[in-house]
Image: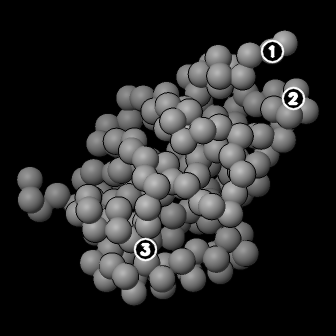
């Protein structure tokens, strides 16, 4: 399977949402194998640990064929090179996201010209969904049903027991 087209869909996934899953599903239509890479961004403070974020992503993506959840503490361009990815697939919700992702794409291309960044616009109805929205709802003890898969919600409930 040396001709397999591999993509990586990176993110903090704190936690993974239906918006992320939409991008991942769309990536599976374009590539033979999709690695979902739970990453660390030193600029962010996380609600869940790297291991918890990875477990939540696995629960959310269970049953999705040709998808493998991994984690990485390094550079995205380096990870793409290590796994033989020909593409880095990212989603964006608005013009601000798009501008940021275009800058990141340039940086990654400079360091790994073999991996093209593919930017997918959020599907209708998912433009306002983010991990931040999910975390804020959790903080305010509001429902998160419909924002991420039920299996992910079940795991989050186990990870965040109530007093």
For mark 1, what is the residue?
A: 162
- Closest to the observer, 17 or 109: 109
Q: Residue at x 8, y 53 (%)?
A: 1
For mark 3, what is the residue?
A: 117
Distance between the alpha carbons at the discs numbered 1 and 2: 13 Å
Q: Residue at x 32, y 74 (%)?
A: 115
Q: Residues within 10 Å of mark 3 (few under 14, many from 20)?
A: many
Q: Is residue 141 left or right of residue 104?
A: right
Q: Residue at x 76, y 54 (%)?
A: 128
Distance between the alpha carbons at the discs numbered 3 and 2: 35 Å
Q: Residues within 10 Å of mark 2 (few under 14, many from 20)?
A: few
Q: Nearer the viewer, mark 3 or mark 1?
A: 1
Indicate which disc, 3 or 2, sits on the residue closer to the N terminus: 3
Q: Nearer the viewer, mark 1 or mark 2?
A: 1
149 relative to 14, above or below? above
Q: Residue at x 38, y 29 (%)?
A: 63
Q: Is residue 14 visible?
A: yes
Quarter of the image with the C terminus is top right
Horizontal and vertical percent for residue 139? 86, 34
Horizontal and vertical percent for residue 114? 27, 78
Secondary structure at badge 2 equals loop
For mark 2, what is the residue?
A: 142
* Residue that lies at the very extreme toward the top in this rendered image: 163
Q: Is residue 125 visible?
A: no
Q: Residues within 10 Å of mark 1 (few under 14, many from 20)?
A: few
Point out which mark residue 90 bears: none
Q: Is residue 80 left or right of residue 40?
A: left
Indicate which disc, 3 or 1, sits on the residue closer to the N terminus: 3
């Amino acid at each position: 399977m040396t001709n397999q087209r591999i993509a990586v869909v990176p993110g903090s996934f704190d936690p993974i949402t239906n918006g992320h899953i939409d991008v991942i599903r769309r990536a599976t239509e374009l590539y033979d194998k999709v690695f979902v890479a739970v990453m660390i961004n030193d600029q962010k403070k996380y609600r869940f640990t790297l291991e918890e974020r990875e477990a939540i992503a696995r629960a959310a993506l269970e049953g999705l064929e040709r998808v493998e959840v991994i984690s990485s503490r390094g550079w995205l361009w380096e990870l793409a090179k290590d796994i033989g990815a020909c593409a880095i697939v990212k989603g964006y919700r608005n013009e601000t996201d798009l501008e940021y992702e275009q800058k990141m794409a340039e940086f990654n291309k400079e360091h790994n010209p073999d991996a093209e960044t593919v930017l997918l616009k959020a599907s209708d109805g998912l433009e306002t969904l983010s991990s931040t929205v999910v975390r804020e709802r959790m903080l305010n003890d509001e429902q998160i049903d419909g924002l991420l898969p039920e299996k992910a919600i079940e795991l989050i409930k186990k990870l965040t027991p109530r007093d």
